[in-house]
Image: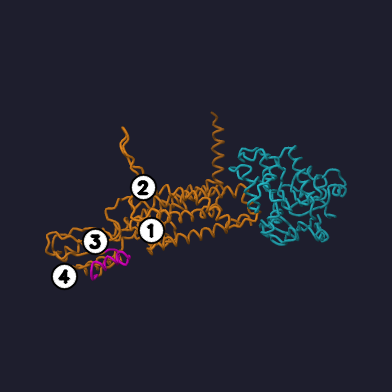
Chain colours: A cyan, B orange
Amino acid sequence: MAILSDAHPDSATDAPDAAIRATHLTKTFGALRAVDDVSFALPPGRIYGALGPNGSGKTTLIRLLTGLARPTSGGAEILGVSMPSRPILSRIGYMTQSDGVYPALTAGENVRFFAETYGVRDSAAVESALELVELADRARSLTAELSGGQRRRLSLACALVHSPQVLFLDEPTVGVDPLLRLQFWSHFKALADRGVTILVSSHVMDEADRCDELLFIRSGRIIARGSGADLRSRAATDDLEQAFLKLGGQTEVTR
Amino acid sequence: MSGRRVIALFRRLTQEIRRDRPSLGILFVAPLLITGLVTFIVREGQAPKVDAVVVNQAGPSGVALTAGLDAALATNGGSATLAPDEATAAQQVADRDATLAIILPPDLVSAPSPTITILTNGLDPPGEAAQLAAASRALVAQAAHATGATPPSIEHRTVYGTPNNDPISGYAPALLAFFAYFFVYILTGVSFLRERTGGTLERLMATPVRRGEIVIGYTLGFGLFAVIQVALLTAWVFGSLTVPAVGPLPSFAIGLGIPIAGSPVLAFLVVIVLAIGAVSLGIFLSTFARTELQVIQFIPIVLVPQFLLSGVLFPLASLPAVLQPFSLVMPLTYAVNGLRQVLIRGADLGVGALQLDLLVLAAFAIAFATLAALTIRRDVA
């Protein structure tokens, strides 16, 4: 197989007002290149889907972008500020892959706690975040007693309570039933319409069409970027899964 | 009953435990470590070094006795020197410039059975018992040699407290300090481990929260419960509330009623400063644990040696020389010492020794807090 050409020509990072920007972002763990020379610039107000199999580096990419992990080389910028930057964190929401909520607190107490860590003292914000995920009636329930789907929703509320401008959602729909998944995506759409930039990671291809733009990730590299329709036509297939395999296996990744 | 299923269970357990290296380490290494440490302390413990000051009221035979005593005590690195008067000698013992003072009576030679008074400091009951025994042996031998008279009887007095203190006074500091230290460590360690494994720390690190804020927040949170626990324990240990007889019930007392010369509030303060350090120690050590079980497993490795070397069970002065430096870098040692200052001596905040203990405990708390803050990003970076 020939060498992969640069999957992200410099024009990919040109957008001047990008909400999320990666510049030759690389993170290695020993010999493993978890994120390998990733560059992109994502204009605001859209939903981006980072799609790739488990272990392809999606979570590491999000951790680099949020400043939770330090890159081995390269850099990340959020809203024009180079990461890691503590002040910019209050404009970022991060829904972790695990629920990341406190089981011994009630749903309301969890949202309030994370609101306060972001400096939000407004109880209306707590209530509206709970309403958005339709948990207002469970606000007084212990988190340990919530169902798996309800905890997922609570986790989303905790990531939204401070009205972030950039939202990272790491596999938000894992273990979420189809109906709830629909609700999640309509929330995301509504947020994007309000100008929030959302990066969703997923390994489920059938969610891809809900994203405005897709980033195919394999072995820490962006192997293709574009809208679902765009990627399908490039791979000459109707099936995104096929497109992923085809574009990934291709020696030249075209834009 | 299926033998195969039993064997399947047996095999699964051995596979699991074999891969849990920390558990294996604790299971096999910790008992060796602790029993080894105790044996080493007991077997290699030093004969107490006694630096005696002698108040001689017995004339030339007293001088001769002192010289003989000096030679006898020198075998363990000690000495016997003459002091001008009892007040000076008592001061030297109080300041720990001398291990103990020996007061030779005027009737040392003439009396049929003279009484020699030995004055010790009083703040380290187990340690002083050993020193007193060593000094008495040497003294009786030398007195018989120097005067040819009947062996003297020894009277023991202490500068602080009384020699026939309630024996529990020597252990009360351990009761107070160790439990606060122990439970605060477990609470924080397990709680912070949950934070690390439950994904909440990851999320917390994505908020503008500072590491220092987390450590201080934890210190306040668990500090509150430590305050309640220690207040309750202090009241229980020192208090004695007599409940009058009611009907057929005889009157009884609630509380252990251990005598305390100083203020229980100061004793409380010493333990709280120690417990605050334990919060950060718990956060710090939770970095090295993957499961709650492993947090518990640090107890024999980290906490039990501190207990053994804190001077509660084995006097510091008689610890083997190689272990002495270790006891000096363990917070529990200073807590025990500070508590003895309060309990036995009745020290107030003006006493230098107590100030020093509190300062060292505070320094430990700050050092542990810094370590804890440094580890918070460690697994996240």
SS at mark 2?
loop
Residue B246: percent from the left, percent from the top?
Answer: 32, 35
Left or right of residue B346: residue A55: right
Are discs 2 and 4 both within one chain?
A: yes
In the displayed structure, A168 sits above or below B367; it is above
Q: Which residue is mark 1?
A: B337
Q: Which residue is mark 3?
A: B118
Q: Which residue is mark 4?
A: B59
SS at mark 1?
helix
Instruction: Give the chain letter at badge 4.
Output: B
**Numbered disc in front, either 3 or 2:** 2
Instruction: Give the chain letter at badge 2.
Output: B
Left or right of residue A99: residue B232: left
Residue A115: percent from the left, percent from the top?
Answer: 65, 50
Q: Earlier in the sequence, mark 2 or mark 4?
A: 4
Cα–Cα gap, marks 3 and 2: 32 Å
Magenta stretch encompasses residue B245: no
Left or right of residue B352: residue A9: right
Residue B177: percent from the left, percent from the top?
Answer: 42, 52
**Numbered disc in front, either 2 or 4:** 2
The front one of A23 and B12 is A23
